[in-house]
Image (tube, grey):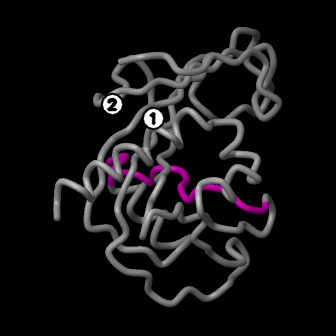
């Protein structure tokens, strides 16, 4: 396990807060996992989804009842991109710690929770219809993907995922 990024007072969380982005092969056990995401690659390109309310982003979302993080990642990837994977592996986690008082109406685990990230290799892309959540999907060259804010903000994670995907593709030939 290695810490690749620490942030304080992320704007999308109640403040004050601290987040740590980790590379790890183990699921977090010290706090609840709320969501799972996939950095999926096909032909050396990163698959992203354009969400109606947030723009381009990595596919993923909240775990449903009785769902493992990997199951959630695979389900969310398919719902948001139509992608089916031929390989998926845990890449890391973001540990979230709200360091202040619990905000009124805060529905997430408090004071700590985690999000997990997987990397994967796309086997096929089924047709995708835009809907109230998803506008479209697209494969991006890594340099082009750097224009996407999430990619820029988490570039160390993306680069590590691409490195692992390239290695897997080379070794599976």
Q: Where is mark 2, residue-wise?
A: 27
Q: Is residue 66 magenta?
A: yes
In front: label 1 or label 2: 2
Image x and y of residue 21, in percent? 54, 25
Question: Looking at the rendering, which quadrant does residue 15 occupy?
Answer: top right
Q: Where is mark 1, residue-wise?
A: 33
Q: Is residue 49 left or right of residue 148?
A: left
User: Mark 2 Cα within 10 Å, few/some/many (few <14, many 20+)?
Assistant: some
Is the residue under label 2 in contact with that under label 1 (CB below 8 Å)?
yes
Image x and y of residue 165, in percent? 35, 52
Which residue is located at x 48 percent, y 78 percent? 82
Quarter the C terminus occupies: bottom left
Image x and y of residue 128, in percent? 56, 86
Looking at the image, which is closer to me, 2 or 98?
A: 2
Q: Which residues are magenta?
A: 55-70
Which residue is located at x 45 percent, y 54 percent? 64
Question: Looking at the rendering, which quadrant does residue 116 occupy?
Answer: top left
Q: Is residue 95 left or right of residue 108?
A: left
The number of discs equals 2
Quarter the N terminus occupies: top left
Disc 1, SS: strand
The disc placed on residue 55 is: none
Question: Looking at the rendering, which quadrant does residue 108 occupy?
Answer: top right
Looking at the image, which is closer to me, 166 or 104?
A: 166
Image vertical order of residue 89 relative to residue 141, above or below: above
Chain-order first, disc 1 or disc 2: 2
Which residue is located at x 67 percent, y 15 percent? 18
Q: Is residue 126 magenta?
A: no
Looking at the image, which is closer to me, 153 or 54?
A: 153
State the CA–CA distance, disc 1 to disc 2. 8 Å
């Amino acid at each position: 396990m290695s810490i690749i990024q620490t942030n304080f007072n992320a704007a999308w969380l109640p403040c004050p807060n601290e987040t740590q982005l980790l590379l790890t092969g183990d699921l977090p056990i010290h706090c609840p996992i709320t969501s799972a995401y996939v950095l999926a690659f096909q032909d050396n390109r990163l698959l992203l989804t354009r969400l109606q309310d947030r723009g381009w982003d990595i596919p993923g979302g909240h775990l449903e009842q009785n769902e493992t993080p990997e199951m959630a990642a695979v389900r969310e990837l398919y719902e948001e991109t139509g992608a089916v994977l031929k390989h998926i592996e845990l890449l890391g986690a973001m540990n979230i710690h709200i360091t202040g008082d619990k905000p009124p109406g805060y529905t997430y685990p408090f004071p700590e929770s985690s999000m997990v990230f997987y990397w994967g290799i796309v086997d096929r892309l089924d047709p995708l219809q835009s809907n109230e959540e998803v506008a479209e999907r697209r494969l991006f060259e890594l340099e082009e993907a750097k224009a996407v804010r999430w990619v820029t903000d988490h570039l160390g994670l993306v680069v590590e995922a691409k490195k692992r995907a390239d290695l897997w593709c080379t070794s599976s030939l």
